[in-house]
Image (tube, rainbow, N blue to C red):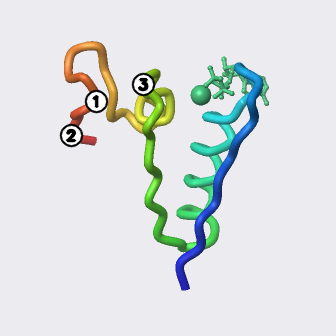
Amino acid sequence: MACRLSIFNMKGGVAKSTTTYNLAVGLVKFHNQRVLLIDIDPQGNSSAALGLWTENNGGCGNA
Ligand SMILES: Nc1ncnc2c1ncn2[C@@H]1O[C@H](COP(=O)(O)OP(=O)(O)OP(=O)(O)O)[C@@H](O)[C@H]1O
Ligand SMILES: [Mg+2]
């Protein structure tokens, strides 16, 4: 069964991206879940944490 999780807070810099990324990694590594992490933040922090975002590729990495 699919489950949707949202991490949100109006305040900036309170670890939304960090929580999202680590939650996704934890679900995959420790709970054998398949996770689709959708990063729609122009900052691309979650993508960068996964090695998918660099200054040169605009977020279209191969990792
Ligand atoms: N548990 C923690 N301990 C120390 N630093 C942390 C922790 N969680 C996050 N940080 C740091 O706090 C900063 C902000 O985290 P993050 O980018 O996840 O916040 P955000 O809410 O997504 O910010 P934004 O509103 O800009 O998107 C980052 O530099 C991150 O490394
Ligand atoms: Mg963020």
| SS label for mark 3 | loop
Residue bearing the label numbered 2: 62
In the rendered image, residue 25, in percent from the top left (x then y), is placed at 56, 53
Q: Residue furthest top?
A: 55
- Graded by Cα atoms within 10 Å as few (under 14), some (14 to 19) or many (20 or more), the crowding at tag 2 reads few
Of tags 3 and 1, the one toward the viewer is: 3
Identify the residue at horizontal 63%, vertical 57% (top origin): 26
Q: Residue furthest bottom?
A: 1
On the rendered image, what quadrant is the C terminus found in?
top left
In the rendered image, residue 17, in percent from the top left (x then y), is placed at 61, 34
**Is there a contact, CB below 8 Å, between mark 3 and mark 1?**
no
Front in this rendered view, residue 22 or 17: 17
Mark 1 is on which residue type? Gly
Mark 3 is on which residue type? Pro
- Graded by Cα atoms within 10 Å as few (under 14), some (14 to 19) or many (20 or more), the crowding at tag 3 reads few
Q: How far apart are marks 2 and 3 (CA)?
A: 19 Å
Residue bearing the label numbered 1: 59
Q: Earlier in the sequence, mark 2 or mark 3?
A: 3
- Graded by Cα atoms within 10 Å as few (under 14), some (14 to 19) or many (20 or more), the crowding at tag 1 reads some
Can you tell which mark lies on residue 37?
Answer: none
In the image, is the residue at mark 3 within 8 Å of ligand 1 by its beta carbon?
no
Of tags 2 and 3, the one toward the viewer is: 3
